Amino acid sequence: MNDLFGSSPKGAKAALRTDKTPDAAPPAREGDAYSAKDIEVLEGLEPVRRRPGMYIGGTDENALHHLAAEIIDNSMDEAVAGHASFIEVSLAPGNLLTVRDNGRGIPVDAHPKFKHLSALEVILTTLHSGGKFSGKAYDTSGGLHGVGSSVVNALSETFDVEVARDRILWKQSYARGVPTTKLLNAGPIQNRRGTTTAFKPDPQIFGALHFLPARLYRFCRSKAYLFRGVKIRWSCDPSLLKGEETPAEAELHFPGGLKDSLEDDIGPAARVIPLWAGEADLPMASDGRIAGRVEWAAVWLESGESVLHSYCNTVPTAQGGTHEAGFRNALLKGLRAWGEQRSNRRAAQITAEDLAGSLAAKLSAFIREPQFQGQTKEKLTSPEATRFVETAIRDRFDHFLGADPTVADNLLSFVIERAEERIRRKELKDTPRKSATRRLRLPGKLADCSVEDASLTELFLVEGDSAGGSAKQARNRATQAILPLRGKILNVASASSEKLRQNQELKDLIEALGCGAGERFDRARLRYGRIIIMTDADVDGAHIASLLMTFFYREMPDLIRQGHLYLAQPPLYRLVQGAKSVYAMDDADREKKTKLFKSGSKIEVSRFKGLGEMPPAALKETTMDPTKRTLLRIMALPEERARTNDLVESLMGRRPELRFAFIQEHAADVIDVDV
């Protein structure tokens, strides 16, 4: 066949016609007869039953529950329009689902175009019919395809509808999309209005599939969260629950809307900033009417994956769409603008990827005449929604940031951290994580411990081989490991990525810990429960400790947040009088402890020049023995994130003018001491 369309060698086409006779028809075959009688015209709802996948995406469990969603969404549209205050959803044996609302009720008068049919029958038996096209009956609705109720009717074994309207009750029944009764006037009725629909999905289409109570309950719960003005009364026959935690009865009403929903989802998870929620009208459309409104709730968590659940007119948009794009644009542009306002040049490198990290959010837009991708409405494609949502939320986000600069700075610092991690991942190939159990390729100068349980072990980071030698003799070989470091390590806050990649000391440290760094940090692979920085009790030792803390803060912040990093407290002095000896941490402590000795007798004071000069027994007694030592845990409080970042940048970063300014500001705090 390809040869006929020019893919054959030159001359092939000419070779097909060398007899100079008209093209001959191929020989007749059985079944080749094709005439007007072979042209089928599918009327009414027959196309739906022939090809259900075109309308509900298939005939699987998702498609089955899509039927329920279509009917419940109709009632939700009545509630959002302000005409219904409650919806009842009931699941009974036999796969019978009943949905009732107290809205206006589907019209039952004669349709002006199909005078022999009621409006109710037109809606339930004709594709692309309904009251949501003109915008007169509903400002916003779950979609304008006009196939919802009619498709459910077509794919149901039985479909019974009751309409309470103008104090009269009307009834009609259907089977597989075909009316089995006329529209019946069931007589007057008081104190009731709205539509009740009871249907059983057709086993000819869905086989043995049944509605799942837990799934229906979650769907109803999400709808109640999405519109705070509605109460949804859920009930399910207990025989269908089969031990599930789903309640048999519940009234779902959430005045807090999406904020309540997000709080329920995230629970006690650690947060970077308080949860931010709000709602706003969308800007005016070209016709001068408000385009709709948007509601949101968002929070950034200390750890975890990004989760954004979005909805349009209460319909879940699992594949996102243009409203999500507007939401992300508003957050990204708003936070960049805040960084510019705070003269933070690093804010310019933030991307949407950085901002989305650990973001937990819910977004609900109500838009007139929405456009969806496909009949199942999983993605919003209305092009104007991006601009409308961005404009509405950006203004509120700017006010949120400006109202509490501390919160805003903490969020900015958190996102900048993620941006810098992303940049480092591109420039630096992290040292591969090593197996904690097989102990492969550990640094040669590491004196490892023998216990395998990380929760029982400690790694001491000491400066130099001399201190390392004393520490190795003083340690408990079963639970305490020693890694000597050569002098002052690289300052990662001011070093280039190339220097960081080439630094052997840091490679050894990452390899010894086994847990990776940056986004590859995995607490489960951490080989030691405590990492203890043990440096000399002098200025140089403090500097080395600062460099190590900077490394952990920049490259392994989760290690600090999860409480694994400590500072050892070795003494600077030993005081001896006769058989009595005590240790002093610093000059002030020495003066205090001198008073513990007898007056008039000579006190011998020894100053340790370094850990390497301390006898192993003394080092064990004062600094390494868990029953006698003092450790300081290094902590990074989420609420102090911005202040901590600024301090690290000022003292350890690439801009010396910040250090100079810090020294000038705090010079008066320094007390002269006689060393």
Image: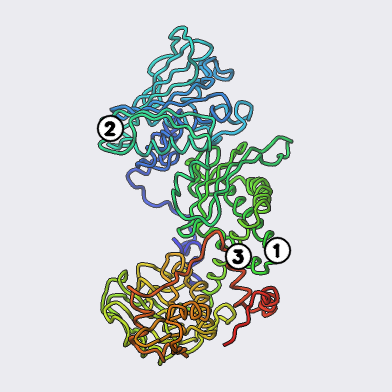
Label 1 packing within 10 angstroms: few (<14), some (14-19), many (20+): some
Q: Identify the image quadrant of residue 98.
A: top left
- Left or right: residue 75 versus residue 668 is left
Which disc is residue 493 wearing?
none
Residue 653: percent from left, percent from top: 61, 77
User: Residue reaching furthest top?
Assistant: 187
Q: Are marks 1 and 2 in contact (CB under 8 Å)?
A: no
Which residue has dot 1 on it?
Answer: 340
Classify 534 as above or below 137: below
- The local secondary structure at tag 3 comes to helix
The mark nearer the N terminus, 3 or 2, is 2
Classify 460 as above or below 211: below
Residue 400: percent from left, percent from top: 65, 50
Q: Quadrant of the C terminus?
A: bottom right
Which disc is residue 643 wearing?
3
Please tell me which residue is depicted at 61% across the width and 73% down the height of the picture: 649
Label 2 packing within 10 angstroms: few (<14), some (14-19), many (20+): some
Front tag of 1 and 2: 1
- Left or right: residue 444 versus residue 102 is left
In this view, the residue in front, 80 or 47, is 80
Which residue has dot 2 on it?
Answer: 240
Q: Is residue 138 visible?
A: yes
In this view, the residue in front, 591 or 57, is 591
User: Residue reaching furthest front?
Assistant: 600
Q: Is residue 51 visible?
A: no
Front tag of 3 and 2: 3
**Amino acid under label 2?**
Leu
Please tell me which residue is depicted at 61% across the width and 61% down the height of the picture: 412
